[in-house]
Image: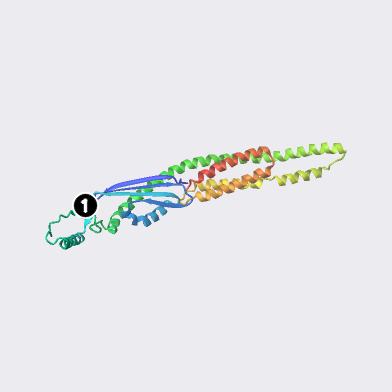
Amino acid sequence: MIRSMTGFGDAACQDNGVHYAVEVRSVNNKYFKASFRMPDEIAGLEPELEVYLRKRLTRGSVTLTVDFRDKSARAAYELNEPALGRYLSHLRHIEQQTDPEGAGRTTIDLASMLVLPGVIQPPSMSELVERCRPVVMKLLDEACDKCLAMRQREGAGLLEDLMIHRRLIAERLEQVRQRVPDVLEEYHQRLRTRIDELMARAEMVVENVDLVREVAIFADRCDVAEEVQRLDAHLDQFEQIIHHDTTEPAGRTLDFLTQEMLREANTIASKSNDAQIARIVVEVKGSIDRIKEQVQNVE
């Protein structure tokens, strides 16, 4: 069963005082393309997250959003006491050099010193990544399940629409088959009438064998049976693909198949030399274009 490339899934949880949230959004794309929106602190997870997404979502533009808010004591930045002590030592030394008699009387604002480089240090990135990895991967799995479920539902809607146009094309092809013998007969009658008129004026007689030969040439030139048969075979293959129960992506195959269907329809229109068949083929091409538009969103 086909799946759409449009989907959304999310998951969230609370773990050891940390709130995690993951969202997966996907839209149609000819290939797989992933983009990430996540805190810099856990950006190191991107490669393995992309590998996982490729396994679950084979085609489409996928946007993964990861957010976490740490309300635990581990979120606090660490105070680098040796660095702060060294800054204070430098200040005392400068004070003694500039004002020996008043040394020790200068007021130092420790709060202002916290912004100096190296005084406040964030928690270890590697430790944070290791702590977040299992939770994020679990939430990503849940979000992908929801996204795939939505893709499946969207695919059911696409399937219904595709089958409507597939049936319409099949019905119009049957009309073409029924019309072809009438086209030959009408051509034969027109040719017979025209020749009779011309020969009556010239007082000449045309052998039936010459007339039959001319009709045979016309029939061969306007024979669309092969194109109709191929287009019918494409329709059967199309139905098999969209109903085939597999996880393999079918979108590219369907896109190529619609191009072949359109090529056969154009050939029928150019060879038939009949206004009624031409009108039928216009409807067929309209349905093929609609199918081609719809399969752009098939995974």
Q: Quadrant of residue 181?
A: top right
Colouring convention used in this rendered image of the protein: rainbow
Numbered disc total: 1
Q: Residue at x 19, y 52 (%)?
A: 111
Q: Residue at x 79, y 38 (%)?
A: 192
Nearer-the-camera pick, 156 or 266: 266
Q: Along the horizontal axis of the image, is 214 left or right of 265?
A: right
Crowdedness near tag 1: few (<14), some (14–19) or many (≥20) residues, C-alpha within 10 Å: few
Question: How far across and how far down the image is residue 25, in percent?
Answer: 40, 46
Nearer-the-camera pick, 170 or 279: 279
Is 7 drawn above or below residue 79 in the view shown? above
Residue labelled with disc 1: 73
The kind of secondary structure element at disc 1 is helix
Q: Quadrant of residue 205?
A: top right
Q: Residue furthest right?
A: 203
Is 249 drawn above or below residue 85 in the view shown? above
Q: Determine if residue 63 is in view.
A: yes
Q: Residue at x 44, y 45 (%)?
A: 6
Is 262 drawn above or below residue 125 in the view shown? above
Q: Along the horizontal axis of the image, is 230 left or right of 132?
A: right
Q: Along the horizontal axis of the image, is 221 left or right of 11?
A: right
Badge 1 amino acid: Ala
Q: Quadrant of residue 8?
A: top left
Question: How far across and how far down the image is residue 271, in percent?
Answer: 68, 45
Q: Residue at x 66, y 37 (%)?
A: 276
Q: Along the horizontal axis of the image, is 62 left or right of 166?
A: left
Question: How far across and how far down the image is residue 233, in percent?
Answer: 59, 47
Question: How far across and how far down the image is residue 162, in percent?
Answer: 52, 42
Q: Determine if residue 228 is in view.
A: no
Q: Residue furthest left?
A: 101
